[in-house]
Image: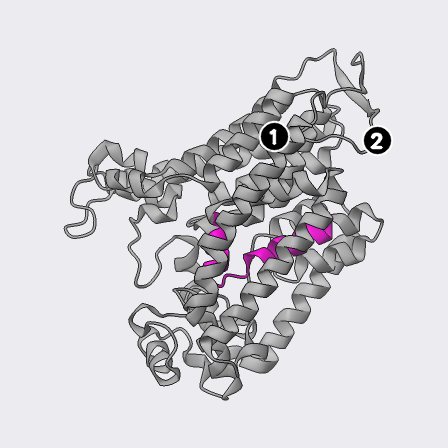
Amino acid sequence: MNRRFVAVLLLAILSIALVWRGVVPAISKVDTDFPNYLTAARIVVDGGPVERLYEDSWFQSQMRRYQIGKPEEGKFAPFPPPTALLLVPLAHLTPLAALRVVTALSALCLLGSVFLLAKVLSWSYLETAVFLLLSGYANFNALRFGQPYMLVSLSCVLGYYARLRGAPFWAGVCLGLFVPIKYFPLVFLIYFAARREWKLVLGGAVATSAVLVLSIAVLGWGVHADFLHSILGTHLTARLSMQSPFSASFQSFDALFRRLFVPDASLNPQPWLALPRLDIVALIVTKSVLFTTAIATLWRSARGGVIDSVAFSIGMLGILTLLLAPATATYHFVLLWLPIGLLINQFYREGKPVMASMMLGMYALIGFLPYGHTFQFEGRGGLTVLSFPRLFVLLAMFWLCLCFVWRRRADQIPVSWGRAGRNSFCSSDSSQGLSYRRAP
């Protein structure tokens, strides 16, 4: 009863915070980000020259024409071309009305994710709702800025649920639908391809291809060619127009190593060491080590007797994707709903409640990090590392996954989970029912 009371109280507090910091700003005024989506949709609906979408000055002139947002802050890059189609159904609305519709849709996606993830994890709706709301600023800013990431996250949860329900083709469709717009689900499709789950991969390929064909048919090939030749490369290296490549707001290794090693008279006058070549070396070595370590860990988890290697792999790959990303924002972390939920569940199922609590704590910490206090260290030589807290918390989550697999006792390999369905982070004894056998 005490645990339930605490969960209800926490849900009430988090819900109030969500409404106050996310919903109210979104229904009151149009902030940054959303005007870029809506302006692109208006251009498409009006039959404008979409091949000019990536010309910042021209795009800003269209924002002035439509009176959307702050033109001096607007740009379509680095969005992939299909992104211009996202808000086409809402293009006839005023900016504020369109944002209110998107906010309502995102709120429904949040509720839908609670319902589906509770079924996937066998948690109560109360526990699942608290878990999702612990995303904190990820939720607030996804709503406030009119970002579609709650919809993308819901599609990932729905895809995983469909796979559990024995519908691999439709699982792939759910995972592949947003790949041409937001790349995150692609890593899951690659993973299932490695597992030779071809029906699922086929569904993903069909959905992805359908979106791309529609985009080319509506927008033409020119803007897609422009994206491939001029935009994609700069996006993958975090060199975005109108944004400093040194910014700690990216919270990535790309930005960190530039801050530490690449001098710039105006943007980075105080690097830790003025060794520009070390930037590239450090970045390649770091990402290579992370990637190869992840592959080895996934291989070991598949052969080391974990209860559900797929669940663990999806969880670890979600963390790895954001860890290797050239740039992340707070709202990207709603994409961790499914991965972190699966990992917490996996840790409890294998009798690792401390690891589960640590993962949950780091997930909540990312949701409520006081970035205003950490950014003051940006550009102050070696102290710059203190301005990248989210990156290092994410790295700690990755390290916890490694410890879970590589520090397993050789004589204890879990083979069953006796408590059908009841493995929650609010449970007082989530390891009950777990049995072991001696490894051969």
- Report whether residue 180 is seen: no
Q: Amino acid at mark 1?
A: Ala
Q: Dot 1 corresponds to which residue? A: 296
Q: CA distance from mark 1 to mark 2?
A: 30 Å
Answer with the quarter of the image where residue 346 lies: top right
User: Is 238 rendered above or below residue 375?
Assistant: below
Considering depth in this image, is 144 or 298 the residue closer to the camera? 144
Q: Is residue 144 magenta?
A: yes
Residue at position x 14%, y 50% in the image: 265
Q: Is residue 363 above or below residue 176?
A: above
Q: Which residue is mark 2?
A: 420
Segment tinted magenta in the rendering: 138-160
Q: Residue at x 39, y 65 (%)?
A: 31
Q: Quadrant of residue 7?
A: top right
Tag 2: amino acid? Ala
Estimate the x, y position of residue 287 in percent, counting from the top left: 46, 38
Name the one closer to the observer, 192 or 435.
Answer: 435
Q: Secondary structure at mark 2?
A: loop
Tell me whether the residue at label 1 lies in contact with that at label 2, contact meaning CB atoms closer than 8 angstroms. Answer: no
> Which residue is located at x 51 percent, y 81 percent?
93
Q: Residue at x 31, y 38 (%)?
A: 374
> Left or right: where does residue 145 sit relative to residue 300?
left
**Horizontal relation, residue 401 to residue 207: left or right:** left
Q: Circle 1 sits in a helix, a strand or a loop, which is it? A: helix
